[in-house]
Image (cartoon, helix red, strand yellow):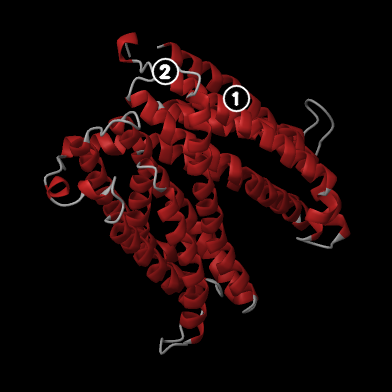
Amino acid sequence: MTEATVSPVAGSASGPARILPSLLLLSAPIVVSQFAQMASGVVDVVMAGNLGVQTLGAVATGAAVWTPMMIFLLGLLYGLTPAIGQRLGDSGSEGDVAGVAGLAARGLVVGLAGGTVLGSALFWGSAPLFQLAGVAPDLIPDATAYLRWVAFALPGMGLFLAARFVLEAHRAPAVVTLITVMGVAAKIALNDAFVHGHMGLPALGSAGFGAATVAVFWGMGGALLAVSLLVRAVRPLWGHRLRTADLSPAEMGRFILFGLPIALNFLSDYLVMAVVAVFMATIGAVAIGAHQIAFNILMILLMTPTGLSMAATILISRAAGGGDRARLGVVMGWTLGLGVGLSVLLAALLAAFDGEVTGLYTQDAIVVGLTLDLLWVVVVVLTIDVLAIALGFFLRGLGDPGSPFLVLLVAHWLVSLPLGYVLCFTDWIVAPQGPLGWWYGLSAGLVVACVLLALRLGQRLKG
């Protein structure tokens, strides 16, 4: 990017004052949407648990299969946000409307087609997978029935995600938040209706959770498309511009290749934690229980900083598209400052109230003791995790999705997991640390990731 393309306005003294409100206004609804999506999964677990161990086991087993599919689809489509942002450029420019319409069209096609492919694999492959994995025979029928319903939800999920990222790229996240919160409320009512046969619907038992998922995701996807017609910035995309979009194999391939590193990045992070959970389970019920509690608390604490970084991606991609280097620095500075400050505050609160927080999950004294040990690692590593997340989203906003994927791949699979195994089970470095060893390994991997991501971001900004 040449200096001639840099906006003279962004470097003014009022620049930071203008950017902070934009960052906060964008991040607030994104954070609420993130919490609402988490709540949707929690609703299923809580309601299934109230119906008995068999129902809970079937839903939990099924969720373990389709959750990574959802994560992959989300990552594949998240590339829409920085790609559209760079096409739109500076907030004062109308941007490349035809180019944005093409991206939106390709996103909708990939969302629907990708969801269909994944759904087909889920529908036909779930039962053989359960048998191959040695799942308890009494769980297989209910878990398979649940997943065969969820299979029909995945294309609707792809539609919802594509529409969501188009709207967020146009700085209209509040619409997404409203629809997502309404979706959680609908999920509660539809779960009850499909499971028990209320409102004239058939009683499907465990499969009812899958049927409710179908209705909710297709409903949210359709609602977002309908509401987007009311958003002035998005309305021009539809109509003739969408119908004339370039859906050639070459353009579709470019779209997929841009989103693929993000999808693999998100999937890799999920699989790393799945591997750690498996090793924790080999230690015993106390270890896996404490690990899951500590991990759940960490994910909740990261929700707000992650939403802040996702909002920053929108502003960064627009600044990069408009050649506004001064704005890039200000957005990154505010994001890092707010993220670090928030992480320090959250870590301090967790340190002060770790016993009370753990008590919300369990009263078992042994599990509580180990969880408290793990939470002190969370207190120390939280800020590092926030920095790693922010740096990764900065690079994606600059149109570089591959670097975060490669860096985190190396950090997690070549540092975190081997070091965690060594610290947990062997005396090669120190005496075996048990479950704490895995968290020390994860922390070391995050430090490596932060250093490498910061170096890469410096290269991108200089270039």
Q: Amino acid at mark 2?
A: Arg
Between 236 and 118, the one lying in front of the other is: 236
Label tally: 2
Residue 217 falls in which quadrant of the image? bottom left
Q: In the rendered image of this protein, does residue 247 appear above or below residue 404?
A: below
| Residue 74: x %, y % from top left | 41, 48
| Residue 14: x %, y % from top left | 49, 23
| Residue 357: x %, y % from top left | 78, 54
Q: Amino acid at mark 1?
A: Cys
User: Closer to the N terminus: mark 1 or mark 2?
Assistant: 2
Can residue 414 be seen at all in this image of the molecule? no
Residue on which disc 2 sits: 325
The residue under the point 60% across, 76% down is 54
Could you tell me how far apart the alpha carbons at marks 1 and 2 are, in whole angstroms?
22 Å
Q: In the rendered image of this protein, does residue 166 appear above or below residue 227?
A: above
Q: Quadrant of the C terminus?
A: top left
Residue on which disc 1 sits: 450
